[in-house]
């Protein structure tokens, strides 16, 4: 079977936005492998023995996607950015529901560097990162979105710029400043908990 083109995926997304359910049904098998890869990246950051499996994460994201009220998909990159955001929320909800130790418990703080975008890091404190991202969102929503797209979505700088409709330079600046801000926030939060 031939690899689907970005144009084909974009056409299906537009048709789905127009309310054509058959487009969604045709789209999901086409994007399933990429969603599974994205879920694997997320799960690779979790502690060993995590009870939520990669396939379950994909299926939960799919169910939420069906219920999502996205009125207009702006192409393939936008679609995967929304999926990454959903996976983040699923994992954070899961972590919050199972967190029995003092905030942060036995999890390592997150190191946000460029390598992290493509290489998984085990045992990320998703609850702490989510709290820090929520705080960043109140200060600068775009920087929060850059982190979400790059860290959780695995998007390149160029893809992130496309989704946010800003320049590559803006994304690189936001990424650098957001990492610094989050590192400070996560470090101060950890020392406040001690």
Image (spheres, grey):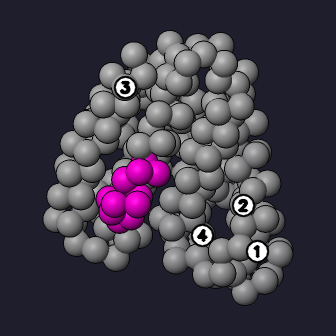
Residue range corresponding to the magenta coloring:
133-144
Q: Is residue 118 left or right of residue 35?
A: left
What element does badge 4 sit on? helix
Q: What residue is disc 2 on?
A: 65
Q: Residue 9, which numbered label?
A: 4
Classify 10 Å Cα crowding around label 2: few (below 14), some (14-19), many (20 and above). some
Q: CA distance from mark 1 to mark 3?
A: 50 Å
Q: Which is in the foreground here, disc 4 or disc 2?
A: 2
Quadrant of res 51:
top right
Q: CA distance from mark 2 to mark 1?
A: 14 Å
For the stretch drawn in magenta, what is the main secondary structure?
helix
Q: Which is in the foreground here, disc 1 or disc 3?
A: 3
Q: Is residue 24 magenta?
A: no
Name the residue at 41% across, 51% down. 135
Q: What residue is disc 1 on?
A: 23
- Mark 4 vs 2, N-terminal side: 4
Q: Is residue 158 left or right of residue 57?
A: left
Name the residue at 65% across, 33% down. 96
Task: Please say if the residues under marks 2 and 1 sit with CB atoms less than 8 Å apart.
Answer: no
Q: CA distance from mark 4 to mark 2?
A: 16 Å
What element does badge 3 sit on? helix
Q: Is residue 141 above or below residue 114?
A: below
Classify 10 Å Cα crowding around label 3: few (below 14), some (14-19), many (20 and above). few
Q: CA distance from mark 3 to mark 4?
A: 46 Å
Expressed as whole percent of the image width and height from the top left, the position of residue 68 reads 72, 67
Q: CA distance from mark 2 to mark 3?
A: 37 Å
What element does badge 2 sit on? helix
Give 46 or 133, whichever is nearer the viewer: 133
Q: CA distance from mark 1 to mark 4?
A: 10 Å
């Amino acid at each position: 079977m031939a690899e689907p083109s970005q144009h084909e995926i974009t056409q299906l997304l537009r048709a789905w936005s127009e309310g054509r359910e058959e487009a969604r049904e045709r789209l999901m098998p086409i994007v399933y492998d990429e969603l599974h890869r994205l879920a694997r990246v997320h799960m690779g950051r979790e502690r060993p023995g995590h009870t939520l499996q990669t396939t379950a994460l994909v299926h939960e994201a799919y169910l939420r996607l069906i219920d999502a009220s996205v009125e207009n998909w702006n192409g393939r990159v936008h679609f995967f950015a929304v999926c990454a955001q959903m996976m983040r929320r699923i994992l954070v909800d899961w972590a919050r529901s199972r967190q029995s130790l003092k905030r942060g418990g036995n999890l390592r703080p997150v190191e946000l560097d460029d390598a992290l975008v493509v290489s998984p890091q085990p045992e990320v404190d998703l609850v702490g990162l989510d709290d820090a991202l929520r705080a960043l969102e109140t200060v600068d929503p775009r920087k929060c979105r850059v982190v979400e797209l790059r860290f959780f979505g695995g998007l390149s700088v160029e893809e992130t710029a496309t989704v946010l409709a800003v320049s590559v330079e803006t994304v690189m600046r936001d990424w650098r400043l957001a990492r610094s801000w989050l590192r400070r926030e996560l470090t101060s939060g950890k020392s406040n908990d001690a």
